[in-house]
Amino acid sequence: MKGTSLGEFEELCLLAVAILLNDAYGVSIKEEVEGRTGKKWTLSTVHSTLIRLEKKGFLISRMGGATESRGGRAKRMFEVTNLGKKAINEARELRNKMWLDIPQVLWEGGTR
């Protein structure tokens, strides 16, 4: 398995898959991340990130049913694995600990 650390966009995509649960596919993930960040992302950026997360073992994918609205093509559906859940939790715990370690004086207008 490749590295287990998460880059910022990887974390956003992984969180989007978790939020979307049973409706996590390329376009819905892209829309979720864009809606949360207010930034535009290309579908190819999202897809390459999802494939990278799958190679790391954080996601699994399966082909959904073909739909008429997609010209008979199926969607690739994504799901967070147990390892992906662990990675999300570790990222959150690290960020929370770091936030707590910021000196209060910084928030009161002071500097270091």
Image (tube, helix red, strand yellow):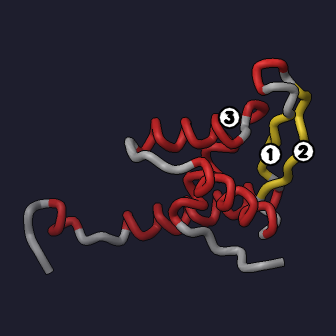
Residue drawn 43% across the image and 46% down it:
40
Q: Is residue 56 left or right of residue 46?
A: right
Residue wearing tag 2: 62
Amino acid carrying label 3: it is Leu
Which numbered mark, 1 or 2, is in the foreground of this view? 2
Residue 23 vs 7, above or below: the answer is above
Instruction: Write down the residue under mark 3.
Output: 20
Q: Single out the residue that lies furthest toward the top.
A: 68
**Could you tell me which residue is drawn at 30 percent across and 70 percent down?**
102
Q: Callout 1, which amino acid?
A: Glu
Point out the image quarter for the C terminus: bottom left
Task: Please tell me which of labels 3 and 1 falls first in the chain.
Answer: 3
Label 3, label 2: how far apart the Cα atoms are: 15 Å
Q: In the picture, which quadrant includes the N terminus?
A: bottom right
Question: Relative to 81, does residue 5 appear above or below in the rendering?
Answer: below
On the image, the x and y values in percent for residue 107 come to: 18, 61
Measure the C-alpha gap from mark 3 to mark 1: 9 Å
The front one of 44 and 94 is 44
Contact check, label 1 and label 2, Cβ < 8 Å: yes
Left or right position of 108 against 30: left
Give the side of residue 29 with respect to residue 33, left or right.
right
Circle number at residue 79: 1
Local SS, label 1: strand
Task: Work out whether mark 3 precedes mark 2 in sequence or the reverse, and give the earlier one.
Answer: 3
